[in-house]
Amino acid sequence: MTRTPVIGITLDSEEPGGYSKFPWYALRQNYAGWIAEAGGLPIALPHEPELAAHYLDRIDGLLVTGGAFDVDPALFGAASRHATVTLKSRRTAFELAIVQGALERDMPILGICGGQQLLNVALGGTLIQHIPDEVAGCLAHEQPNPRNEPGHTVAIAEGTRLAAITGAGTVAVNSAHHQAVKNVAPGCIVDATAPDGVIEGIEAPDKRFCIGVQWHPEFNISEADRALARAFIEACT
């Protein structure tokens, strides 16, 4: 019987208020459900950078999630920080530590939304700090309709691993971000693009499985989203 692959999922963190009067972790249920439905065993990863190697010893794949925050622009060499940028420094320190450790082990990695941005920075790329200020005539990448509905389409680049996984040239996706990949990290290629030119997907062809997508496939709004989960779990098996 094949062992169920263990998938570590990074958590979000919040300051006191709402759920607790003390700092607390958060994770939408559909991240874990998406992994479980595809055949993985999801576990949550608290933000302990010094324990990153121990987490990696116990998981078979890493899912870096999104959240309402941004990677510190100083980490990709920006001289200034846009007024819209919100930081969660300990979360970013942890995610950088565990992503870099996973890359060294060639462990399968999937970055979603902010997770794609973090992955690009970890590999040496840069980010657009606020899309409306840098992309003329941009789409509403923070879509006004619910996140479980499409917001726009993306074009999947031929010959990429994402194209092989989805079997599609165009996919309808949801959209909930104000930042995006600017300069693609060395060793990575663009595999998905929005109609306004914003990069929606990257991958590292020389890695066992290293893909980032800017949308939220955990909502399963298309067969392509389900196929991505299955391919990730297969790579972790």
Image: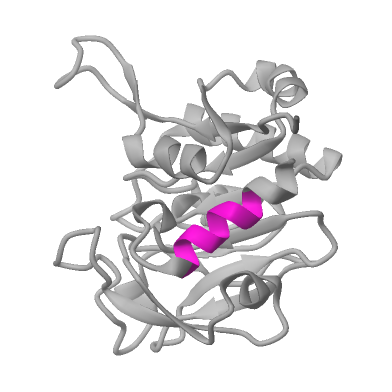
State the image coordinates of residue 171 (x, y, percent, origin top left). 43, 79
State the image coordinates of residue 8 (x, y, percent, origin top left). 59, 31
Is 193 left, or right, of 221 in this rendering?
A: right
The residue lying furthest to the front in this view is 1
The residue lying furthest to the top in this view is 22
State the image coordinates of residue 159 (x, y, percent, origin top left). 72, 84
Is 170 left, or right, of 150 in this rendering?
A: right
Image height of 9 relative to 186, above or below: above
Image height of 7 relative to 51, above or below: below
Q: Is residue 109 visible?
A: no
Q: Quadrant of the N terminus?
A: top right
Q: In the rendered image, which quarter is residue 99 located in? A: top right
- The residue drawn where x is 70% and y is 77% is 160
Is residue 142 in the magenta section? Answer: no
Is 90 left, or right, of 54 in this rendering?
A: left
State the image coordinates of residue 66 (x, y, percent, origin top left). 42, 47
Is 226 left, or right, of 138 in this rendering?
A: right
- The residue drawn where x is 29% and y is 89% is 137
Q: Quadrant of the C terminus?
A: top right
Chief secondary structure of the magenta portion: helix
Image height of 76 relative to 48, above or below: below
Coloring basis for residues? one colour
Q: Nearer the viewer, residue 140 or 208?
A: 208
What range of the chain is rendered magenta? Answer: 224-232
- The residue drawn where x is 14% and y is 66% is 145
- The residue drawn where x is 68% and y is 21% is 55
